[in-house]
Image (spheres, grey):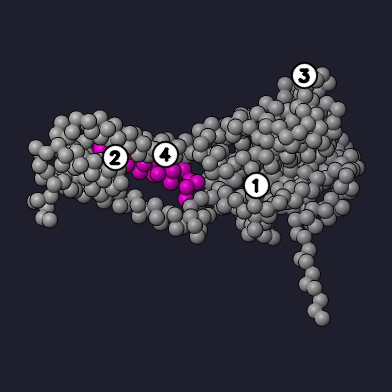
């Protein structure tokens, strides 16, 4: 059939059957291959432009899919930089506008008045719904890209990447709890996570906040002040000489010890805690993550809550003295909102710091499990808004894609936990740091299994 005889471009205007069938062809083609309706029945210049844009988008999507299947870290890296996200937002906004233009032009080409009366409403409704679905999805994607860009800029620094040391990335996790009865912030949850740079195997080392006589490596500014350990001989400048007081002392009283901390995306108190964690574990720490425990409540609510198995009833306190119980979190499997999850992690009434450490790890693992693509995408706006208020870190944007890919491997493996508590042979108030470093080394660098002898 020649183009001149084509019923799409030159239909029989007097036949409602032909015009109705043509209308459905055009609106479906506009949905499946935007631009094709114009090439076949309208402005060929606009059609070629729309068709070229559509084919270009398909090509990019196929390339991205192939790269994601074989080299997922590349995709994660590309889409975890602010510049790329702004480019993505601009491209999606362009396609959203283009699809609106092509859809309205398609509706013009349909000539509804020439179609069967019973089909007009259906054709028009289908066209509008498809336009809203396709263009609306692109516009929403552009909005998410700009939101993600703002989130990344507010949380992650623009700095050089650190290489793994001995095949490991060691990250200091601090759960900060300022509280109305405290002068400044004190980390109530202190943990070092060592992650194998290839396999993603994670080892967490739980550091009790009441550890005494904390040692410092020779290159730490605190080593000159406390050569025998934190408060071991001369005492310290705060009321209680234990691990989580180091942050407060340095941040409020001696920030000049770490003059470059702020310019490097950190704080003097955080750098002091990094030095303390390195002295305790013997591990060099490349990055830190500080989580505001009060803001953590918002993040859990944004995720839709977390599910944990509560081993025994846990109290929620009525006041900051942690003596009066307002209500209880009952034993058993519980789905906790942010308020109850936070209290589950920090409750003190009738319990020990070591119990709290175990509960905090439980909450952290539950939150990690909640971070799946479907959950994050469906609640991205709320998660990003909460995350920008909750998290402070010196992980550079350039490493974010790599760590996202590594985290996907970590989720598939059991996490090895090394709590430095009495049940593990450690007395935090009179610690044997040589023994502690031995425990850490055995967990982080386990001996290779021996090959069975032949014969």
Ranked by sequence position, the earlier of labels 4 and 1 is 4
Q: Secondary structure at mark 3?
A: strand
Q: Secondary structure at mark 2?
A: helix
Does 90 lie within the magenta span? yes
Tell me, for residue 431, which label it has, or none.
none
Whether residue 50 is situated above or below residue 313 in the rendered picture: below
Instruction: Identify the residue under disc 3.
Output: 326
Q: Would residue 213 be visible to someone looking at this image?
A: no
Q: Nearer the viewer, mark 4 or mark 1?
A: 4
Instruction: Identify the residue under disc 1.
Output: 287
Instruction: Identify the residue under disc 2.
Output: 99
Determine whether, in the image, residue 438 is placed left or right of residue 24. Answer: right
Does 71 lie within the magenta span? no
Q: Position of residue 289 (x, y in %)?
A: 65, 41
Q: Are marks 2 and 4 in contact (CB under 8 Å)?
A: no
Instruction: Identify the residue under disc 4.
Output: 141
Q: Are marks 4 and 1 in contact (CB under 8 Å)?
A: no
Ranked by sequence position, the earlier of labels 3 and 4 is 4
Q: Residue at x 32, y 37 (%)?
A: 130
Q: Secondary structure at mark 4?
A: helix
Give the extent of the magenta segment. 78-104
For the residues marked 4 and 1, what is the alpha-carbon distance in whole angstroms?
31 Å
For the residues marked 3 and 4, what is the alpha-carbon distance in whole angstroms?
44 Å
For the residues marked 1 and 3, what is the alpha-carbon distance in whole angstroms?
38 Å
Q: Nearer the viewer, mark 1 or mark 3?
A: 3
Q: Nearer the viewer, residue 397 or 24?
A: 24
């Amino acid at each position: 059939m020649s183009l001149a005889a084509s019923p799409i471009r030159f239909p029989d205007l007097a036949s409602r059957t032909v015009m109705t069938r043509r209308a459905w062809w055009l609106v479906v083609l506009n949905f499946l291959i935007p631009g094709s309706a114009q090439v076949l029945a309208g402005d060929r210049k606009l059609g070629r432009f729309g068709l070229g844009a559509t084919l270009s988008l398909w090509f990019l999507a196929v390339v991205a899919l192939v790269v994601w299947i074989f080299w997922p870290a590349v995709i994660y890296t590309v889409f975890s930089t602010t510049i790329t996200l702004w480019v993505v937002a601009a491209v999606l906004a362009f396609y959203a506008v283009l699809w609106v233009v092509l859809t309205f032009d398609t509706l013009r080409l349909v000539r509804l008045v020439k179609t069967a009366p019973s089909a007009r409403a259906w054709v028009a409704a289908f066209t509008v719904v498809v336009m809203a679905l396709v263009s609306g999805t692109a516009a929403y994607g552009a909005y998410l890209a700009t939101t993600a860009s703002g989130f990344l800029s507010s949380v992650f620094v623009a700095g050089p990447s650190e290489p793994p040391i001995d095949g490991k990335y060691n990250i200091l996790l601090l759960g900060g709890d300022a509280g109305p009865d405290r002068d400044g912030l004190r980390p109530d949850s202190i943990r070092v996570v060592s992650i194998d740079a290839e396999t993603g195997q994670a080892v967490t080392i739980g550091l009790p906040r009441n550890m005494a006589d904390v040692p410092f490596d020779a290159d730490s500014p605190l080593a000159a002040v406390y050569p025998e350990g934190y408060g071991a001989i001369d005492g310290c400048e705060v009321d209680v000489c234990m691990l989580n007081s180091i942050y407060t002392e340095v941040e409020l009283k001696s920030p000049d010890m770490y003059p470059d901390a702020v310019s490097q995306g950190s704080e003097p108190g955080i750098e002091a805690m990094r030095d303390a964690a390195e002295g305790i574990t013997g591990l060099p720490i490349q990055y830190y993550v500080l989580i505001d425990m009060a803001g953590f409540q918002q993040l859990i609510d944004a995720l839709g809550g977390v599910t944990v198995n509560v081993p025994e009833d846990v109290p929620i306190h009525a006041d900051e003295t942690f003596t009066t119980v307002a209500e209880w979190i009952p034993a058993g499997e519980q789905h906790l909102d942010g308020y109850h999850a936070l209290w589950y992690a920090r409750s003190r009434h009738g319990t020990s710091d070591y119990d709290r450490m175990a509960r905090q790890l439980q909450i952290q693992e539950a939150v990690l499990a909640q971070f799946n693509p479907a959950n994050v995408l469906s609640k991205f706006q709320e998660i990003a808004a909460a995350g920008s208020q909750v998290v402070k870190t010196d992980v550079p944007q350039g490493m974010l894609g790599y760590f996202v890919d590594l985290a996907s491997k970590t989720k598939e493996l059991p996490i090895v936990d090394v709590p430095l508590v009495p049940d593990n042979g450690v007395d935090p108030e009179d610690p044997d740091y040589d023994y502690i470093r031995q425990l850490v080394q055995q967990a982080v660098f386990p001996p290779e299994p021996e090959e069975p002898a032949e014969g």
